[in-house]
Amino acid sequence: MILNLSIIVFGITGTNGKTTTSYMLRNILEQGGKSCSLVGTIGHHIGDKDYEAINTTPGAELLSDYFKQMEAAQTECCVMEVSSHALAQGRVDNIPIAHAAFMNLTQDHLDYHKSMEEYYQTKKKLFQLNQGASLINIDDAYGRRLYKELLEEKAGSKVRSYSLQEIDADYRGEIVRESLSGFWFRLWELGRKQGIIRINLSGKHSVYDALAAIGLAKEAGIQVEDIEAGLKNLVGIPGRFEIIKGLEGSSKEGFAAIIDYAHTPDALENLLRTVKELKQGRLICVFGCGGERDKEKRAVMGKVAGTYSDYCIITNDNPRSENPEDIVADIEEGLYNTGGEYHIITNRRLAIRWAVSIWQKGDIIVVAGKGHEKYQVIGKEKRNFDDRAIIREFIGQE
C-alpha cells in the first residue's frame, strides 16, 4: 500500500552522481524556503536528526519510520537516493515518488544484477513507480533509451530531458568556464537562456548533476534566482571532489590532493580526465577495488587509471574477506597493458604516505574509491580509516 504523505518525495537514481545531485537539490529547495530531509549514501538527515547510512536506501520498515518522523516535523520535501538494490528488493514500492531523475548507467553491481540489461530494467522501475515528472540524462546511452521508452509507455506524463550536447533538450548546460575550484555554465530551459550558473565542484559530470537538480527543483516551483543561489552557496560535498590543500608558508604550500568516491570505471575516468585537464605537473592516482564485489570492473579501472594518470599506486579499498593480492592482480592486468608507470602498495595508509612523499609542486594527487567513508573493511573487521585525515596527517595538518 502506498503511504499517504504530504511530503514531496524526489527520487534520484543512476550509477554515478546520485549523492552530488541530492545535496545540490536539497540546498536549492532550502534556498527556496522549503524544509527538506535527505536519504542517501553519506547519511540520512531526517528533520533535525542525523543517522548513519548503513545502506544508501534503507529498508522499507526504516523508511516508513523516517517518513513518520518527517511528517511529525512538518517536512515539506524529501530528497532520496534510490539504489538498484533498493528497487530490486522493493524497498521503495510503497513510497509516493513525486518526481524522479535518471543520471546514467555504467558498469557496477554486476555481482548482484548479473547483466547490464537486468541492471537497466531494475533502474527503470523507479520511473514506473514515479507519479510526476521524470528527468532523464539523454547524453547517456541508457538514458536515451529510457527517455524514448517513457515517452511511449507513459504518454501524457511529464518526461523531461537534460543534456550538455542536445540543443533541443528541456534543460541544457553550456559550459563557459572551468577551474579546479568549480564550473560556470549557461542554463537553457526549453530553448530559452536563463543565465549563468556557478557550481563549486569540478568536472563535467558535476554539471550533469546540477542540471538534474535544476530540473527537479523547477518541478517543485523553485525560481531561477533561488536555484542559482542554492548551487553557488553549496561549498562542498564530503568525499566528492574534495580538495585538500597545503597551508601557505608551509613545506607543502601548493600541495593539492583530491578525495573522491569514484569506484566505477566511468566515475574514475570522469574524475581523472577532469584533473588531467587542470593539472600543471603530474597526476598521481591512488586507488583500489572492493573485495567480494564486481570483479569484471577491476581490470577496466586499471586501464582507466593507467591511461589518464602519470603515476599510479594500486592499493586496498575494502578488501573484505577476499585476498588483497588477488584484487591487486586483477587491477594490474588492465593497468600493465597501458604502459603507464605504477607501484603496488597494498597497505592503503602506506600508499597514501608514498604518494605524499613523491609529490612535487604542480602535481595533483587523486585518492579514489572511498571518498567520505571513515572506515576500511578488512576480513570481518571494520577499522577506522579516513583518506582525508591521513593526507592531512602526512602534510602536517593534524
Image (spheres, rainbow, N blue to C red):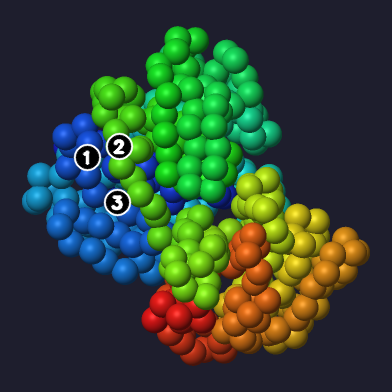
> Which amino acid lies under the numbered mark 3 shown in the image of this protein?
Leu
Residue 104 can be seen, yes or no: yes
User: Label 3 belongs to which residue?
Assistant: 38
Left or right, residue 111 beside residue 388: right
SS for callout 3: strand
Looking at the rendering, in which quadrant would you find the C terminus?
bottom left
User: Label 1 belongs to which residue?
Assistant: 30
> Which amino acid lies under the numbered mark 2 shown in the image of this protein?
Gly
Q: Say which label, 3 or 2, has the lower sequence index.
A: 3
Q: Say which label, 2 or 1, has the lower sequence index.
A: 1
Please report the residue visible at 38 percent of the width from the left and 69 percent of the height from the top.
54
> Does the CB distance between marks 2 and 1 fall below 8 Å?
yes
User: Label 2 belongs to which residue?
Assistant: 230
Residue 294, position as x, y percentages in the image = 68, 65
Q: Say which label, 3 or 1, has the lower sequence index.
A: 1
Q: Which mark is residue 150?
A: none
Residue 161 can be seen, yes or no: no
Looking at the rendering, in which quadrant would you find the N terminus?
top left
Residue 256, position as x, y percentages in the image = 54, 63
Relative to 141, residue 351 above or below: below
